[in-house]
Image (tube, helix red, strand yellow):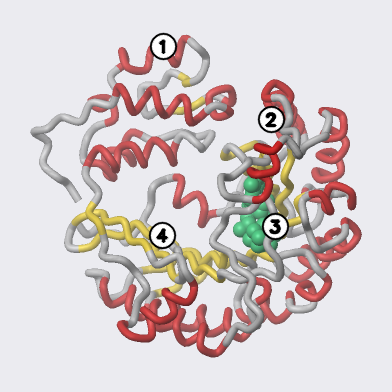
Amino acid sequence: MENKVDAGLAIYVHWPFCRSKCPYCDFNSHVRDNVDEARWSRALTAEIAHTAARLESPRRRATSIFFGGGTPSLMPPSVAAAVIDAIARHFTLADDAEITLEANPTSAEAGSFRGFRDAGVNRLSLGVQALNDTDLRALGREHSAAEALAALDAAQTVFPRASFDLIYARPGQTLNDWRGELKQALALAGTGAGAGHLSLYQLTFEQGTPFFQARRRGAIQPLDDDVAADMFDLTQDMCEAAGLPAYEISNHAAPGRECRHNLNYWRYGEYAGIGPGAHGRLRLQGALCAVKAHRSPEKWLAAVESKGHGGEPPARLDQRTRAEEALMMGLRLREGVGAERFEAATGVPLRTCLPASARQDLIEGGFLAPGADGLRATAKGRNVLDAVLGELAASLQIPAEVPVVS
Ligand SMILES: C[S@@+](CC[C@H](N)C(=O)[O-])C[C@H]1O[C@@H](n2cnc3c(N)ncnc32)[C@H](O)[C@@H]1O
Ligand code: SF4
């Protein structure tokens, strides 16, 4: 099914390189002595052309671009300019397209901010992580708190919109420590013309990372679950009171300042992934497909140079998978999963998949909120979303006779 009105496409571009690898991070990020930037620029633009050509409608509208990583602020701004230019040539880039770049807050990278703005970036997402030097060192970060604050100030001056990330529930952090730090963060995020957005992530111990090993050895003591849950609740309350309510589990914004690119994922909209390890959800030959690229930067580069793209063959998503994904993404949002959007994505009405009887226990437990039109998790439910999703998946009813709708 091709929409009569093009709902637009979000385009994610992955830059897989970092100056050093942080011990908690399991993103597809790599440290390399030399990166041939001109070669990477050619490969990224080639994959953009290939993606545009494989879509059924000749010129899809691109409503947002997100440069993520790794550390895309290490790219020369000329590479960002070439990528944006390629997207504008192969797609219809919306006049008000949101173009975000993730950046590390070192002084070297802050020096490139104007170059990125001139290339077309209009939103910066800065990985501050902590506001004191002791915790930044413990997180293995290469910048000081003062450097991060200077980079944030520069970002808020140079870009129309700027957000920053903090990681909380860090080993040794107390509820009071976090209260003080969040207060400072809200003062920084709530002021200035381009401010109004904050991403606050609870530290997770990802398998395979040095932090994961250290926890296993007992060298790092994670916070008690109850303390982490109290920090989550405190975060909701303080952000709400400061006018930056949570619109997603970890994302807080003043009304109208939400990240539109990420909202598109959570609303289960269509998106394309460019670069190593990037994922996409695209309608191909009438069916919603998962598109995934090789994770290894070298393997991806070689594939693009030999065949024009670094992707594995697209996989059609069946109705159960689409229903599970729409719930998994949508329940992260405060607004929840809309009945209409769910049905458009899956071909099955939400009330058929999840009749009232399947929701009742979770509603009575205070994890889901009742609602005739759609489904939404409460803050309590969003804090334990994996468990909520597990229960919902177990009671999901996909009628076999419904034909595949795409
Ligand atoms: C791709 S990374 C960051 C971009 C940039 N390279 C940086 O480090 O600032 C996106 C965000 O994920 C968060 N993150 C990464 N690993 C995490 C973990 N194990 N637990 C919680 N948050 C994490 C960090 O806040 C980080 O800013
Ligand atoms: S947190 Fe950022 S800088 Fe650190 S390794 Fe991950 S992507 Fe790279």
Residue sitting at x 62%, y 72%:
121
Query: What is the spatial separation of the Cα atoms under label 4 and label 1, in whole angstroms?
Result: 34 Å
The earlier-in-sequence mark between 3 and 2 is 3
Depth order, front residue of 239/17:
17
The earlier-in-sequence mark between 2 and 1 is 2
Q: Is residue 401 left or right of residue 112?
A: left
Depth order, front residue of 203/350:
203
Q: Residue furthest bottom?
A: 38
Q: Residues within 10 Å of mark 1 (few under 14, many from 20)?
A: few
Residue identifier under label 2? 232
Residue identifier under label 1? 361
Residue identifier under label 3? 22
Residue sitting at x 80%, y 63%:
142
Q: Is mark 3 within 8 Å of ligand 2?
A: yes
Query: What is the spatial separation of the Cα atoms under label 2 and label 1, in whole angstroms?
Result: 23 Å
Identify the secondary structure beneath mark 4.
Answer: strand
Residue sitting at x 27%, y 25%:
351
The earlier-in-sequence mark between 4 and 3 is 3
Query: What is the spatial separation of the Cα atoms under label 3 and label 2, in whole angstroms?
Result: 23 Å
Q: Is residue 179 above or below residue 365?
A: below
Of labels 4 and 1, the one closer to you = 4
Identify the secondary structure beneath mark 3.
Answer: loop
Of labels 3 and 2, the one closer to you = 3
Circles 4 and 2 in contact, beta carbons < 8 Å = no
Depth order, front residue of 148/345:
148
Q: Amino acid at mark 1?
A: Asp
Residue identifier under label 4? 279
Residue sitting at x 40%, y 67%:
294
